[in-house]
Image (cartoon, helix red, strand yellow):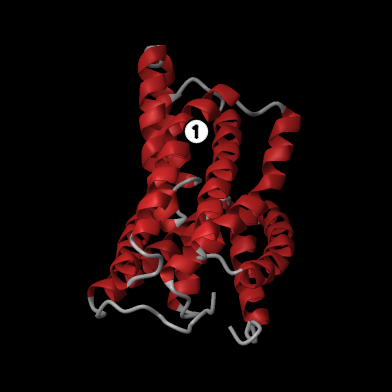
Amino acid sequence: MDAIGNGFGFSLAGLVVGTAVGATGVGGGSLMTPILILFYGISPALAVGTDLLYASISKSFGVLLHGRNGSLDWKIVGWLSAGSVPAALVTVFLLDQAGGSTPALDRLIKFTLSGAVIVTAVFTLFQELLASRLNLGRARGELEPAMQRTLTVAAGVLIGAVVTISSVGAGVIGMMILLILYPKHAPIRIVGSDLAHAVLITAIAGAGHARMGTVNYELLGWLLIGAMPGIWIGSKLGFGMNPKMLKRVIAGILIVVGSMTLWKTLHTTPSVVAGAVAR
């Protein structure tokens, strides 16, 4: 990558995404991976692999805070992981068998990525409506424990596969599913459990991508340099701004980015972005 000659540009991307995450809790891979692909010309496989490790590292601090506050349900994390970890390992194996960054794989990543980003945006827009409906669910009660566990494992399988392919889904999509399956759980415990699982699954999927050679550690470093102060700045800004308005703005950006990714995939002849980022 010419010694990351555009390193400060990558740090700027990390700063912007980190600020969005700190202010709203939304952004992460949903913004970072499309930005790397659309605006920096990074090959999809490399963007996903690098972003997975970026997400795992940047979210670890949040898990420590939730652990200290006791806002983690390790049983939920365990049942999710029972599905997501095998799914991630199998998906990494299949991606590796596909030969790493190939035109077909790049196209699959872009399709999966655009779909996951748009789903994330839609959930972000209707999060309050879903929460109000779930209040009715609390009055009716939860599913039987055995059914809860089965559906949680199944959700883990879906999340593990989607995250490994696109780097999106471990955060907002996982939280959406958990809110539906566990309506009587305190929301803060759902957030903490989802975050802990996100760190685990992005680390495993990222390690798999690293083994495939689809991680650039210098790029990762530049992203983290921007992300860490960005998360702090975003958390400070979030206190003084309307959180609903912020989430709507982020959701709108996600819809645009997801649609751009899908449009580019549909209207571009499959090709590897060779030389965009040297492994």
Q: Residue at x 36, y 78 (%)?
A: 272
What is the secondary structure assignment of the residue under circle 1?
helix
Q: Is residue 112 left or right of residue 238?
A: left
Instruction: Give the answer, above or below, for where 126 lies relative to 48.
Output: above
* Position of residue 257 measured from the top left corner of the image (x, y, whole percent): 40, 68
Instruction: Give the answer, above or below, for where 110 lies relative to 180.
Output: below
Q: Residue at x 62, y 80 (%)?
A: 9
* Position of residue 82 measured from the top left corner of the image (x, y, whole percent): 46, 29
Residue 193, by quadrant, is top right
Closer-to-camera residue (176/41): 41
Report the label total: 1
Residue 110, by quadrant, is bottom left
Q: Residue at x 39, y 44 (%)?
A: 90
* Position of residue 1 measured from the top left corner of the image (x, y, whole percent): 58, 83
Q: Is residue 204 left or right of residue 63?
A: left
Is residue 227 at all visible to an observer of this figure?
yes
Pointer 1: what residue?
81
Residue 154, by quadrant, is top left
Q: Is residue 207 left or right of residue 228?
A: left
Q: Amino acid at mark 1?
A: Ser
Instruction: Give the answer, above or below, for where 164 lies relative to 159.
Output: below
